[in-house]
Image (cartoon, grey):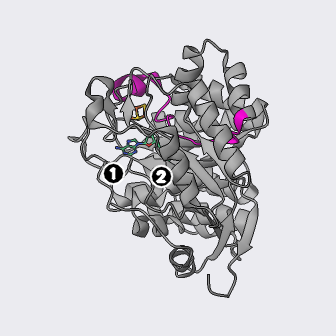
Amino acid sequence: MVHPFNLSEVFKQSNLDKGLLRIAEKVQNGERITEEEGILLFEKGELGYLGSLANYIADKLHHGKVYFNRNFHIEPTNVCLFTCNFCSYSRLYKNKDEGWELTMEQMLDIVRKYNGQPVTEVHIVGGVHPKMNLEFFCELLSKIRAHRPDLHIKGFTAVELDYMFNKAKLTRAEGMKKMNDAGLQSLPGGGAEIFHPDVRNIICPDKVDGEGWLDIHRTAHNLGMHSNATMLYGHVEKYEHRVDHMSRLRQLQDETGGFNCFIPLKFRNQGNDMSHIAESTIVEDMRLYAIARIFMDNFRNLKAYWPMLGRQSAQLTLSFGVNDLDGTIDDSTKIYSMAGSEEQNPALSTEELCDMIRSVGRIPVERGTLYNEIHVYDKEMA
Ligand code: V47
Ligand code: SF4
């Protein structure tokens, strides 16, 4: 599906800004764009131009394939010591009666519910609860591992890990090794938000800072683990903060190669302390996905998380550089329904995911957590 036409030649015939033309040439030649060029894309890149470039790159890398996986979530608690202003999900420790705290057995029951089903990944993520410590989660990990060794365990944001390691008085390397030995295989991308302190100090002042987040992911990569990266956008940040964020991730990826994918997360404004901020428009969302695809040249995979975006917008991202829609989810997460997503009970069957992908002319592929291909749904039904 690589485009038959010469991208930069097409743009030469239009009245395109010189800087944008130079970026089209770079994309055509597989060259990296600078931070200044990233900002120019946000300032001046029109939707159609950005979509053509992003599609060109995604098709070159993935030949029309779009990935999904069969997964479910465990959210151990929504009680949290931190006070991120954008969070609609957490309840403060002093109000813990309004929240939930699952016991070890309740979490293992969630895993047992999938006995005999072909799920490949469990995603564990929640609030930072002072009583759910490293020892507790190592026990959970080893029990899941013993019960279902084929299930890939992706769990705990850098925010949760930072708190657990500090509390256990372990270095990041020591703490990560313990979790890894107990069964943790990958880290999800949460907690990254926007790294730049000018924004972080406004939206989430009290949790691990940007450098700390990056260092925890570096530590995981150095142990041979993989992880994801996110960016929470569409609130108080400016274009330069987005580019700074993506640039720091691009640098760490150059250093370790340990990131599996990049996931832009659209700020949803219901039920939180930032509800007065309007949500970004769908045009701004698609422009951002496309720019991420162009800027993050060392990330093979760009994921649209459909429970947060809604399935129609998620489908549209497939024309703006996205090659992964995450998973079947099975109504096992509350983070986005509580923040106002149109997906109040997120669950998609394999058939529905395949239809969503096929109906925009792409090839659905079931993947494992590490993007190993499990099944290509070429022509046959799901
Ligand atoms: O860090 C919280 C975000 C993240 C809101 O790695 C919000 O595969 C929008 O990171 N509006 C946690 N976003 C979830 C996460 C994630 C989700 C799916 C897949 C993966 C992966 C990671 O959720 C938080 C924060 O950035 N978030 N509140 C909100 N109101
Ligand atoms: Fe706690 Fe995470 Fe919500 Fe922040 S985003 S308040 S760390 S649950």
**Relative image position of residue 196 (x, y in whole percent):** 48, 26
Q: Relative to 368, is 234 above or below?
A: above
Check disc 1 and report its element: helix, strand or loop: loop
Number of numbered tags placed on the structure image:
2
Q: Residues within 10 Å of mark 2 (few under 14, many from 20)?
A: many
Write the residue at 26% across / 36% down: 98
Read off the residue under disc 1.
280
- Return the residue nearer the eye: 185 or 276: 185
Check disc 2 and report its element: helix, strand or loop: helix
- Badge 2 residue CB within 8 Å of ligand 1: no
Does residue 185 appear in this view?
yes
Write the residue at 65% across / 15% down: 170
| Quadrant of the image occupied by residue 214 | top right
**Relative image position of residue 273 (x, y in whole percent):** 24, 34
How far apart in space, not on screen, are marks 2 and 1 (Cα)?
Answer: 10 Å
Q: Relative to 143, is 21 above or below?
A: below
**Relative image position of residue 109 (x, y in whole percent):** 52, 51
In this rendering, position of residue 271 left or right of residue 149:
left
Q: Is residue 251 magenta?
A: no
| Three-letter code for the amino acid on which mark 1 is drawn | Ser
| Three-letter code for the amino acid on which mark 2 is drawn | Leu
Pointers 2 and 1 in contact (C-beta within 8 Å): yes
Write the residue at 43% across / 58% down: 307
Read off the residue under disc 2.
288
Residue projecting furthest to the left: 276
Does residue 45 appear in this view?
no
Boundaries of the magenta span? 182-203
Of the numbered discs 2 and 1, the one sitting upstream in the chain is 1
**Relative image position of residue 7 (x, y in whole percent):** 65, 67
